[in-house]
Amino acid sequence: MKKSRSRVIATAIVCAVFIGLFVIAALTTGAPAEEGTSRFFKSYWSLLPPVIAIVLALLTKEVYSSLFVGIVSGALLFSDFNLEGTLTHAFEDGIVASVADASNVGIIVFLVVLGILVVLMNKAGGSAAFGRWASAHIKSRIGAQIATIVLGILIFIDDYFNCLTVGSVMRPVTDKSGISRAKLAYLIDATAAPVCIIAPVSSWAAAVSSYVRDGNGLQLFIQAIPFNFYALLTIVMMVFISLTGFDFGPMAKHEKNAKENGDIFSGMKQLAETAEEKANEKGRVVDLVIPVVILIVCCIIGMIYSGGFFDGSSFIDAFSNSDASVGLMLGSGVSLIITFLYYLARRVLSFKEMAACVPEGFKSMVPAILILTFAWSLKAMTDSLGAKEFVESVVKGSASGLQYFLPVIVFLIACFLSFATGTSWGTFGILIPITLSVFPLTNPLGIVCMSACMAGAVCGDHCSPISDTTIMASAGAQCDHVTHVSTQLPYAVTAAAVSALTYLIAGFLPNVWIVLPVGIALMIGAVILLHCIHARREQ
């Protein structure tokens, strides 16, 4: 009761502060930066909408309403507090335009198909059979967590695909091992973007390569991998915590509740009820493995197809030029058809039963699609207010005279920008060209700064409650989204702090063989220290 009252008071105070800021903004005078733009264009006000959405989501635990308030606040600033302009910009230019965007539609189709595949695998008994097999072979909580990590690393093609596939496959295993859904969501999220950003054959590598104009994008990406400290240290941290059980913060409470009381949901009753599926006695492990393998193969083929592989391009060039939205949509669609035929041939499901899985799978993805739609709309608001241009001017203005400190500066700016906008790829597009203009590729610090940009973008994406990858991880684990964000945030912030310190050292000593071991030692030391502090507080 006291916590609820404190939360209400804190929310009221924050709302009052934001209302005060909007009153100040409304009274602020100033000419538009460009014809047809708001007077808040390319100013610090452009970052206010995502800040509002993030703060309210963390305080109220209501992500839908918080995102919508952020969208409306962005539309208010864009329209200079005109009611008609606010409604038009929020709905037409924001929500409708985001849903109508071809790339976003492809992601939505991909999500729906994955939802259908997950329901099919559950109805066919594949998930239950894999759970029985895993229970016989994976005897411990450590084994279940390591198996989740290994599967997440193996599925390095795309973070969306990673989140939902690992979640659907490993949920039965982690549930029987007494691992909380919050911990599962963290393991999924920590093996999504952090793994994709160090995998040369992934949609992320293709995205980064596309921002390097001289055609050496993939080569530069590979050179930057050893210096991608946030991704590497996140993997080290995740494995170390899984092996030792040195959890801390809110995650420790969820894990203790799951281990001692058997409550893997920690009070999330609705999710607990919907998570239970009736097992099909005809199901076998192959009924899960074969559809997943088909999905992986089809998605890879779909991505290289979208990059022109079948028109004569090499595999590397095709992957670099691929459109992840198109490739994943085509790959998942073909894999769904093949899975239908496979289950019919196996006679584990009738055609009528499989057809019933279509609306059920769509329904299971509605929360994720709604959050994604609002997150995309919020990004559209920040783009219309010139947030990218504002950050670009700040970075260029502070780059001179800070050469040795630039890696950590780039990392921190990328963290903030990605956290506020909920997108890593947009951050790449802003900061990578700036970084390349400051440092030539022949300069060792140029590679370090490139890595810092990519690492910071992934870090902000990993922390942000409005990030699509974070949303996917919650959906994959069937974990409450705000619970996932609040339990993961201390881990992500710890990895970010150690990474920032490591980049500070790398600015003066750009030697990966020296700096990376130092970073790993600092990471392990930080986890041990935080675990001891948490354990002492609990005594």
Image (tube, helix red, strand yellow):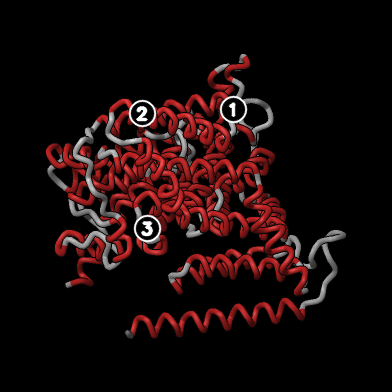
Name which residue lies at 42% across and 80% down: 7
**Vertical placement of residue 463 versus 233, above or below:** below
**How many numbered circles are shown?**
3
User: Please, what is the three-letter code of the amino acid marked with disc 1?
Assistant: Ser
Pinpoint residue 74: horizontal percent, then vertical percent: 67, 66
Q: Picture quarter containing residue 47?
A: bottom right
Identify the residue under disc 3.
488
Identify the residue under disc 1.
306
Residue 70 at least partly seen: yes
Mark in the foreground, 3 or 2: 2
| The disc label shown at residue 293, or none | 2
Spatial CA span between label 3 and label 1:
34 Å
Quadrant that contains the N terminus: bottom left
Mark in the foreground, 3 or 1: 1
Q: Secondary structure at mark 1?
A: helix
State the residue in front, 267 or 2.
267
Pinpoint residue 266: horizontal percent, then vertical percent: 26, 65
Say if mark 2 contacts mark 1, CB within 8 Å.
Answer: no
User: Tag 1 or tag 3, which sits nearer the N-term?
Assistant: 1
State the residue in front, 346 or 494.
346
Pinpoint residue 325: horizontal percent, then vertical percent: 56, 38
Q: Crowding at label 2, few (<14), some or many (≥20) Cα neighbours within 10 Å?
A: few
Residue 233 at least partly seen: no
State the residue in front, 340 or 264.
340
User: Please, what is the three-letter code of the amino acid marked with disc 2?
Assistant: Val
| The disc label shown at residue 219, or none | none
